[in-house]
Amino acid sequence: MSRVLLSIGSNLGDRLARLQSVVDGLGDGLRAVSPVYETEPVGGPDQPDFLNAVVLAVTGDYVTWPTAAFWPWLLLGALSQIIATGLMLVAMNDRSFVVTTAYLKTEAIQTAIFGFVFLGDHLTWLKVIAILIATVGVVITALRPGAEKGFAEVRPTIIGLVSAAAFALSAIGYRGAIITVPGVSFVTAASYTLVWGLFAQTVVLTKMIQMIKKKKISREGRLCRQQQVES
């Protein structure tokens, strides 16, 4: 937030009412108002005296510590995104990324369904038809010649659908978190959610890496002791 000093004045009509309208227009951004001073005009044609004042105001949105309603939505978004990305990496490792990517394109329709269920989004038949057409279109364009054989495999199908569902839940989680941030613009609420989302993901991923390293060190320690015993 930034502090600003505004010099306000009027010499026409109801001068005091004009000053008061400026003060009222600042709303919650108003911090202090000086006394009102009457001054004579300097130069120019003959004109009435001015009423002047100075106001102290703040600009920008003020955000507080996250509310209790914010955290469940945020964690849903952040953790679902980690799971979805992890499943994509599994698909790449299995060399079934083409099929998985095709099923990932169902994210749009799953997001619409989850938005209707969890956030009460209004869905019309036209919206549903548009989503279906778009989904079918991107699935078709994601396919490569000969890749249709992979659709007979269950594993990449499940990975693709679950990953798409996780990405959809991630979008819903972040939207839900943004909605719970009170009294600020959408941009501020979205940025606020992004910062906390990245923080939550950093904490979770750091903890996961520490656990993996600990298991790896423990496993290497057991192998080393076993080799010492055998020798």
Image (cartoon, grey):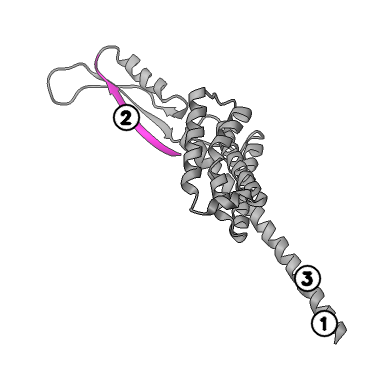
Which one is closest to the eye, mark 2 or mark 1?
A: 1
For the point 48% across and 34% down, the residue is: 133
**Is 8 within the magenta?**
yes
Which of pointers 1 and 3 lies earlier in the amino acid sequence? 3
Which of pointers 3 and 2 lies earlier in the amino acid sequence? 2
The residue lying toward the viewer, choosing from 63 and 73, is 73
Tell me the SS state at disc 2.
Answer: strand
Label 1 is placed on what type of residue?
Gln
The residue that mark 2 highlights is: 7
Coordinates of residue 163 in the picture (x, y in percent):
61, 46
The residue lying toward the viewer, choosing from 90 and 75, is 90
The residue lying toward the viewer, choosing from 10 and 21, is 21
Tell me the SS state at disc 3.
Answer: helix
User: What's drawn in magenta, residue-wise?
Assistant: 1-12
Which of pointers 2 and 1 lies earlier in the amino acid sequence? 2
- Above or below, 10 against 87 in this view is above
Residue 227 numbered tag: 1
The residue that mark 3 highlights is: 219
Which one is closest to the eye, mark 3 or mark 2?
A: 3
Left or right: 14 as drawn, with respect to 221: left
Q: Residues within 10 Å of mark 1 (few under 14, many from 20)?
A: few
For the point 69% across and 57% down, the residue is: 207
